[in-house]
Image (tube, helix red, strand yellow):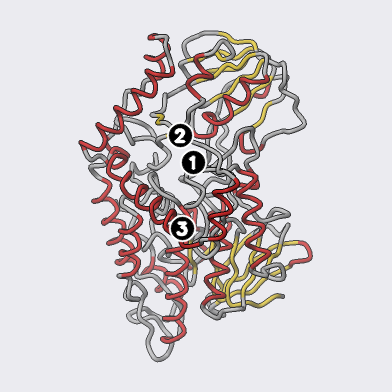
Amino acid sequence: MTRVEVAIVGAGFAGLEMAMALRRAGRESFVVLERAASVGGTWRENTYPGVACDVPSHLYGFASHPNPDWSGVFARGDEIRRYLEGVAEREGLGDRLRLSTPLLSARWDEPGERWLLDVGGRGGTIEAATVVLACGRLTEPSIPDVPGLQTFPGPIFHSSRWDHAADLAGRRVAVVGTGASAVQLVPELARTAAHVTLFQRTPAWIVPRGARAYTDAERRRFARYPEELAALRAELYAEGEARFASRSGDAAASAAAEAVALSHLQAQVADPELRRALTPDYTFGCKRVLLSDEFYPAVASDAVTLEPSALARVDGGTLVSAQGRRHGVDALVLATGFSAGQQPYAELVRGDGGTTLAENWSAGMTSFASTVVSGFPNLFVINGPNASLGHNSAVLMIETQAGYVVRSLARRDAAGGVLRVDPGAERAYTAEIDRAAASTPWITGGCRNWYVDDRSGRLTLVWPGTVEAFRARLARADGSEFVPVTASGTPSGVGMSTAGHRARTAPDRRR
């Protein structure tokens, strides 16, 4: 059995930042568990043609590891994966990484006040005082329940599980979905496929991307003058924060951004009927706003047919739309997103009384500080409830959460005992989120988005504020969110029995 202070699950941006934050705080007793054979998270998994980040590259990186060598304003997926591999190497994390080590289960051991993690195989069991779930939110592909899908005779795969053995050149390819991945891969497929049929259930608001490559001279200057790189990062951060207004429902900002998007569509699509099919009928910002300079020209070309309705059924090699049109294709790509609201790792984690995190979140994810959950002692979740963004870099949120984890561990060390979230603090934080979200387009904008949990109608993925507001909110967390511990080590006001403690910490699901 391996014993550590902290077990981190996941080796993407969140897991690596957590490991670095622990090191900066002088905490060396940790391991990073990763189910795959290398670090990289979503940038290891997503390898579809055209995959790239839609956050400017010099903002989409760790503050502690600026990279002067990004190839352009927006980094390619393979570049980001290599960047993360380089960070892990420079930080000397090799001996802390447990690659090809999937988490099979994590169970809170009440008598021992520890987590027991089953990682199977030679890894056996890991005993940890603290667990940090850094598993990401876009990990489990969402596969639509389409009648006859299993009858399709050709290559079929999700965009995040790209089958590079399938040669799509010169073949008729269907793409289902018009979200962020589809907007990037459709133009690439249009260049090589015989024809692309694009199934669009709901059009997206799309604004110009403005991508360009950095020159060799620019990259040399970034390397030689780090203060200029820092100034660029600050400028990009400020631009991102300014975008929050248009995404969150500010009338003037939303109108201005919508005008930009409509002008972009008008300039790139000449056919008025096609333009109408590509024009959203919901409020700007309700769904994720996409960036592309290539998607509209590809859809407007002879290489692509837009099917402006959902895929209704599959009859062998023929796809039938919700409007009854039939399309014969040779290959099928599902760009249908992820199970973001119901995190797959939640089934594996059992807290007080054996309750799984999935059971605890059966009516939608809740937390305090978007990081800690009542009923799950000494457990932290990075990139979990209300920690996503629609306007700025998610790395900024990750860094803020990692700082909160380190501060909480220091408080635990000073006070002794176990960090147990006060259910009242979690309810109050959830109420804050609900109040802030109530008037935003995510709730009122007339669309269906992955930010809102269908089971509760609550905003559970996105933080309804700026990055600066998130930093300030977590900075105000002073430790009072945790149940006080008496001199005997028992949580104050809680009986000695596990049942009594469970009753104290069970979340209120009457919302």
| In-front residue for pair 66/383 | 66
| Quadrant where the N terminus is found in the figure | bottom right
Local secondary structure at mark 1:
loop
| Place of residue 192 in the rendered image (x, y in percent of width and height, measured from the top left) | 68, 20
Q: Which residue is mark 3?
A: 228
Local secondary structure at mark 2:
loop
| In-front residue for pair 157/500 | 157
Q: Residues within 10 Å of mark 1 (few under 14, many from 20)?
A: many
| Place of residue 384 in the rendered image (x, y in percent of width and height, measured from the top left) | 46, 55
Q: Nearer the viewer, mark 2 or mark 3?
A: 3
- Give the distance between the C-alpha atoms of the residues marked 1 and 2, in whole angstroms: 8 Å
Upstream in sequence: badge 2 or badge 3: 2
| 15 lies left or right of 452 | right
- Residue 209: mark in rendering: 2
Q: Tell me: residue 510, above or below residue 6.
A: above
Q: Tell me: residue 319, above or below residue 505.
A: above
Q: Amino acid at mark 1?
A: Asp
- Residue 54: mark in rendering: 1
User: Residue at the location (29% across, 39% down)?
Assistant: 246
Upstream in sequence: badge 3 or badge 1: 1
